[in-house]
Amino acid sequence: MDEVFRALADPSRRRLLDRLNDRNGQTLRELCAGLDMARQSVSKHLAVLEQANLVNTVRRGREKLHHLNAEPINAIAQRWIHRYDQDHVHALANLKTALEAEPMGDPVFVYTTFIATTPERLWRALTEPEFTRQYWGGLEVVSDWQVGSPILARFGPDAEPVDQGMVVLEAEPHRRLAYSWHKYQPAHAELFGWSEEKFAELMAEPRTRVAFDIEEAGSVVKLTVTHDGFAGETEMYRAVSGQLAESGGGWLHLVASIKTLLETGAPLPEATPA
């Protein structure tokens, strides 16, 4: 966390974060525009922010897009604020999601954390039912994890697997996993109090996708979760990014729970998944 506070101490780096707050997912050229800083200086500041995990990058074709990353803020909340003032934790959560909002264009949720584990164990945590049931509220994911195969959801060891339309899109064991995300379920309508008309409207949204990139980083593993394909700031985007209180924190909580499970043997207290 020392790196986070050192990174935030510089006003130029805070200005870059402000620019990403205004519009997330910018290239280096876009970030340099209108700044009284040389391109090399901007690159150096971005490198410090990346080192502190406050900014992460995603390749899109030949471009490298810079995104704010809420993980360090989430870690600060978990380590200190949570134990003192629950109301302030929720306020900080609102700040985290505000930092991730993208007012221009379709939003993309990008979240990076570092876990004291191995790529092999992290892959197991993402793909094996005995792991997913621990951090996903009892939900087990069932698949052979071959490209094109369905991913079934089993809500309990004695339940029949349910096909929610999720399909494996990419699978490189211990490196990258991507799959199409489920659409809204009747349980969501009940949870959020949607009318039949509202539910039908939401079901017309395009299906989204989530990707997990796994990289060795010395003695730890870097995990980047990218969830995209949203048609604007939809209810699904707000749920997975943790902006809806009923969603239980979305990916923020789920990834933190995976990290805690792999590092301590026990997940975070249960939250309602998106």
Image (tube, rainbow, N blue to C red):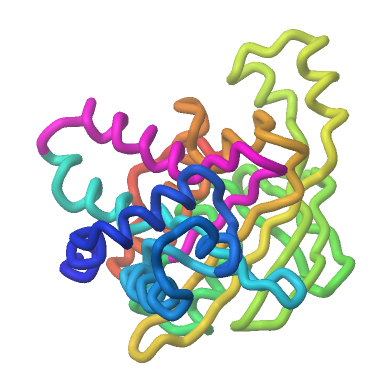
| Rendering coords of residue 48 (x, y %) | 33, 74
**Nearer to me, 75 or 31:** 31
For the point 89% across and 67% down, the residue is 148
For the point 71% across and 43% down, the residue is 106
**Nearer to me, 32 or 146:** 32
| Rendering coords of residue 39 (x, y %) | 48, 75
For the point 24% across and 64% down, the residue is 4
Residue 148 visible in the picture:
yes
Quadrant location, the N terminus: bottom left
Displayed quadrant of residue 124: bottom right
Magenta run includes residue 221: no
In this picture, is 130 found above or below 234? below
In this picture, is 130 found above or below 241? below
**Nearer to me, 222 or 10:** 10
| Rendering coords of residue 259 (x, y %) | 38, 64
Displayed quadrant of residue 235: top right
Displayed quadrant of residue 71: bottom left
In this picture, is 250 found above or below 67? above
For the point 31% across and 55% down, the residue is 14
In this picture, is 186 found above or below 118? above
**Nearer to me, 196 or 98:** 98
Quadrant location, the C terminus: top right
Considering every residue shown, the one lying at the far left of the view is 84
For this view, does 59 lie left or right of residue 254? right
| Rendering coords of residue 239 (x, y %) | 57, 35
Magenta run includes residue 110: yes
Q: How many marks?
A: 0
Residue 131 visible in the picture:
no
Q: Which residues are magenta?
A: 84-112
